[in-house]
Image (cartoon, rainbow, N blue to C red):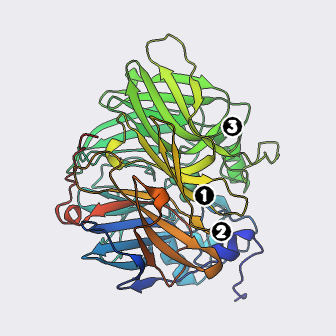
Amino acid sequence: MEPLRFPENDLFKGWGEPLRTESTIEGLEIIQGAVPEGLEGTLYRNGADWQYPSNRPDDIFIDGEGMFHMFRFENGQVSYRSRWVQTDRYKLQQKVKKQVFGRYRNKFTNAPEAGDVDMGTANTTAMFHAGHLYALKESDLPYEMDPDTLETIGRTDMAGQITSASFTAHPKVDPLTNELLAFSYQAKGDGSKDVVFYLFDGDGKKINEVWFEMPYAACVHDFAVTDEWIVFPFFPLITDMDVVKAGGTYFQWNPDQETVIALVPRYGDASGIRWFRGPATSAGHMLNAHRDGSKVHLDVCLYEGNCFAFFKTPQGETTPVVPPFLTRITVDLERNESGFEKTRLMGPSCEMPRTDDRVQGRPFRHGYMIVYRSADGSSSTGHLNLETGELEIWSPGPGDTVQECQFVPRTPDSAEGDGWLLVPVARVAKGRSDLVVLDAQNIAAGPVCTIKLPVRVRSTFHGTWVPAETLKTGRYAYALGAG
Ligand code: V55
Ligand code: FE
């Protein structure tokens, strides 16, 4: 066999160096403060690592096998565990002892040993619903995980209820109603224009399903919800199956195509869909959406250009790297026009926006995000008060970076924003991580608790918090207190 060696790629250097190892650490050292009283539960996060080196120089950061992480808070102590998601693809590669899957989502670049095994990496997020924990990738069905051991239970179509080829990695579990809102895009397979919206009740039973077509075979990484409308933004990062079949990239940036927004009725059918259009922009992540009279607001980290510079135009041109700005896109259902308005909500650029999960789809005040405003490569955690416009910041220190934060309510019925932010921090120069706990109402004061990891938690994408009680009952017992 050829020597295993990672290709020359900045992706595999420094903090991004493949770690390729699973950890089990009981009783992490708490190097500052103490775990707040009542913070009992598990933070699950998901990211990508590299099982075997490929021979391609063009691997991209959103690819790689799922590495699933958990931080369990119990009685003032925190334990950490990380495990590979044992996807069909992972297991096959483990057997043949090398990388046999090709370019991101392009099965035509797989080695013959891959056969017709699905390319899903299950690397993007963790979802807990109706008593089950899942690892998700938007190009594949969910994988169920054991919530205590992180053993992979297996791929699931949720008892036949998911009839699409894939399932989003940005579902919304409503912790007040226990409903699960989710979708699939390219839902009838690679390159298809089909989208399906799914609504499940708190017991995991599908109660609505709306199929429709998008204007082109877009990358629909995230969506947003309101009480009446589901908001689907379509950005012109488009799959051209002729390009894919010829071994090219799965998506291409098409600046001559429009941004299209579909409002789908949450409890209705496809006949009620409303469409809105504007110039080409792109985005990965939504902060939230809410209804305001006849208007629907979508708050999104919007790129005025291509959010993924590694996807070129059909002419093979690389497009400039543009920063994401938190932007409110507003449509008015009463005005008989198909445009939308855009308003910038915050000065510095930001990504990985989150709210208190209890306000998803509802009028809200507080947003949390990774803020980019330093020249030294570091990043910060931000708290934006959308009512006052005030931005509060916590910085981990020179050269260090923060990952997406997770809000945890102080009590199950505290007011919006009264709680904690859990933030994985990369201590870049030290080659290891911390998990810090910030008071969400005073993040600038710095951590109330710093939990030291002796290992590097490589960059993860997204995750979820499951209260100890919810892990037992399968239900969130949250309410939203008056602010
Ligand atoms: C995104 C992330 C993905 C992916 C497609 O952030 C889009 C956007 C982590 O994987 O497969
Ligand atoms: Fe994402």
Split into quadrants, the picture shows ligand 1 in the one at bottom right
Residue 239 in view (yes/no): no
Task: Tell me which numbered mark, 1 or 3, is placed earlier along the sequence.
Answer: 1
Residue 361 in view (yes/no): yes
**Circle 3 sits on which residue?**
304
Badge 2, how many Cα within 10 Å: few under 14, some, many 20+? some
Asked if residue 307 is positioned above or below residue 329 in the image, the reply reads below
Asked if residue 20 is positioned above or below residue 319 in the image, the reply reads below
Which SS class for mark 3?
loop
What residue type is disc 1 on? Answer: Arg
Asked if residue 430 is positioned above or below residue 377 in the image, the reply reads below
> Measured from the top left, where is residue 152 in percent x and y?
37, 73
In depth, the one of 295 and 436 nearer the eye is 436
In this rendering, the label closer to the viewer, 3 or 2: 2
Q: Quadrant of residue 36?
A: bottom left
> Measured from the top left, where is residue 229 in percent x and y?
38, 29
Q: Identify which residue is drawn at 71% across, 75% down.
A: 13
What residue type is disc 3 on? Answer: Glu
In the image as oriented, which residue stretches furthest toward the left?
473
Q: Identify which residue is drawn at 36% across, 33% down.
A: 363
In the image as oriented, which residue stretches furthest toward the top?
336
Task: Tell me which numbered mark, 1 or 2, is placed earlier along the sequence.
Answer: 1
Q: Are marks 1 and 3 in contact (CB under 8 Å)?
A: no
User: Mark on residue 398?
Assistant: 2
User: Mark on residue 105?
Assistant: 1
Residues under labels 1 and 3: Cα distance? Answer: 25 Å
Label 1 residue near ligand 1, CB within 8 Å: yes
